[in-house]
Each structure stands twice: as C-alpha cells, then as structure tokens.
Amino acid sequence: MNIEHKTWKDPVLIAAVAPLAIVMLVFFLVPLAMTVVLTFQTTQYYRLVWSWDLKVWTEVFSKPHYWTIIGRTIVMAVICVGLCLLIAFPTAYALATRLKAYNTQIQIMIVFAFLTDAVLKTFGWILVLDRNGVANWMLGAVGFAPDSLDILFTPVGAMVGMVYNLVVYPMFTLYLSLVRIDRDLLLAAYDSGASRLRTFFEVTLPLSRPGLYSGGVLVFVLSLGAFLEPKVLGGGTSPLASELIRQSFETRVNWPLGAALTIVLISVGALTLALAGLLAMKRSPALRRPSA
C-alpha cells in the first residue's frame, strides 16, 4: 500500500487549510496575543496604564489566594470528568449494543442535547434541588424527612449542574467509538472461551479508548471554564477560576489581572490537550510517523 505524503507546497492542501487558518488567526490568535500583551500593563484609578512591567504576574504568583481557586477549579474539573465518564460509558454502551434499532433516533436525541440551552437546564435544577423542590418531595413521599436533600447553593449542587450539562460530550464520543467496534472481534473472543466480562475488558474497553480519552478531555477543558453552574447552583460559596476572572474584569476593573488569570487557565487547558495528544499517539501506533 503506497502512502502519499503531501507538503505545504501543494496548492490543494493550502486552499483546504486557508479558510480555517484565517478564522483561527482573526478570532483566536489575535485576541490571545492581545490578552498576553494586556498582562504586562497596570491600572491606576480604574484606568489602564501602559507600563510594560511584571507587576501583575508578580501578584499572581505571590498570592496563594489565586492558586487556591485555580486548584479548586482543577479538582472540580477532575471530579466532573470522573462522574461524567461513569455515567456516560454504561449509557453509551447500552445505546450502542441494546438499542441499535433506534440508531437514528438516538443520534437525533444526542444532537438535541447539544442544542438545548444550558441556562434553561441549569436554572431548571433549582426547581429540583430546592428545599421545597421536586427531589425533596419525592424523598418525602418514600419516607425520608423533609428537607433531607440540602445541596442547593453548595459545591455539590454546582457539580450536579456541571455533570448534567457536560455528560453529553463523553456520551457522544463513546457512542461513536462503541458503534464502530467490529462485532466479529467480540464473537471471536467468545469462541476462544472468554466470558462476557473478560471480553469487555480485553476487547470492548481498549477499542473504546479514543472515545473515552476525547470525552474526558472535552469535559475537563469545558469544566475549567464553568461559570453558570457554580454561580447559580453553587451560590458563589466556592468560586471557581471563571468567577475570579469575572470579578477581576468587572468588579475590580483590573483588566491586566483578569487577563493574566485567563492566560493561566488557558495554559492549564492547553497542557491537558497536549498530554492527551501524546497519550493518544503513544497508545495508537497508527498515529505515529512511519519509520523510514
């Protein structure tokens, strides 16, 4: 099998990449560069002063308060990833193996889950988690004490909203990975004497790793920027990095500080993507460069 190697001198390749490159340059790289430049400025009397010094970065790295909030954000993101994968994997597995007859309907439902407004879904949880809400009413109906569920305006309530809004991402990626697994591989494992459990861990789970990794990375990166759920369902009791950035820009009117915190958060997300990419290349020999 001959592999065709293309170079950037190919006009067809340039024409295919140029539109995306222009969009990335105008709407991502230029604003990112402006944000980096903003971190080297200062403010005086709530006005931006072009000073070109490291005062803001010194403040960021010298005050543990900022890193406590960033650390809390990372921990919440990791917990959210774990919970989303625990919920998404069995759900996607059931959709891909037990409900194949409804493949089109399932894909439509997943698309609608992406299109549903996160604001409506988040505020809807207030009606469920409130002390007089649906959850406590259902618990009271089966014999629990009134107000037995009191997690609204707590970090647990924020986590419920984050998982609910983000679980659809790993569910979608895992579903795509699971439906592409060749059924003959499973039958071959059964014919070799493997049990269903062993077949799952030695065939199904390894082949679903791309969906597992991509879904986990998506949830982690999106969780880093979670703003609505901690504010609405968490009540601001344990603010995350997004709330700290908002306060820096709006309340304190300290744009350089907000820009520096934004760069820190973007760096954490970019490092996660880089590590995930290296792990994927290590796990998938097909992604490595062919040896000469």
Image: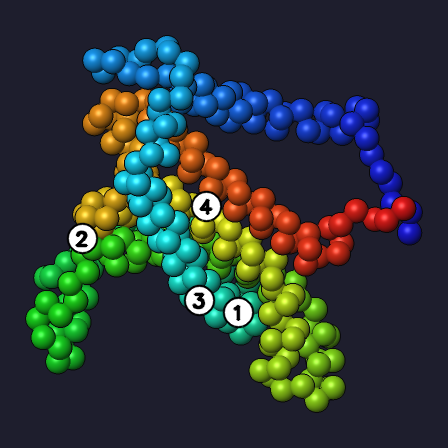
Outermost residue on the top side: it is: 50
Local secondary structure at mark 1: helix
Local secondary structure at mark 4: helix
Residue receiving disc 1:
93
Name the amino acid type tagged 4: Val
Contact flag, marks 4 and 2 (Cβ < 8 Å): no
Q: Is residue 228 above or below residue 54?
A: below
Residue, x 57% and y 23% (percent of image)?
25
Q: Is residue 234 above or below residue 254?
A: below
Name the amino acid type tagged 1: Tyr
- Across and down, in percent, residue 64 comes to 30, 41
- Across and down, in percent, residue 284 comes to 71, 57
Contact flag, marks 1 and 2 (Cβ < 8 Å): no
Q: CA distance from mark 4 to mark 1?
A: 24 Å
Q: Looking at the rendered structure, which numbered label has been put on residue 221?
A: 4
Viewer can see residue 226: no
Q: Looking at the rendered structure, which numbered label has been put on residue 232?
A: none
Q: Which mark is nearer the camera, 1 or 3?
A: 3
Residue placed most toward the observer, 249 or 138: 249
Residue placed most toward the observer, 64 or 241: 64
Q: CA distance from mark 4 to mark 2?
A: 23 Å
Residue receiving disc 2:
153
Residue receiving disc 3:
86
Mark 4 vs 2, N-terminal side: 2
- Across and down, in percent, residue 110 comes to 46, 55
Q: CA distance from mark 1 to mark 3?
A: 11 Å
Name the amino acid type tagged 3: Leu
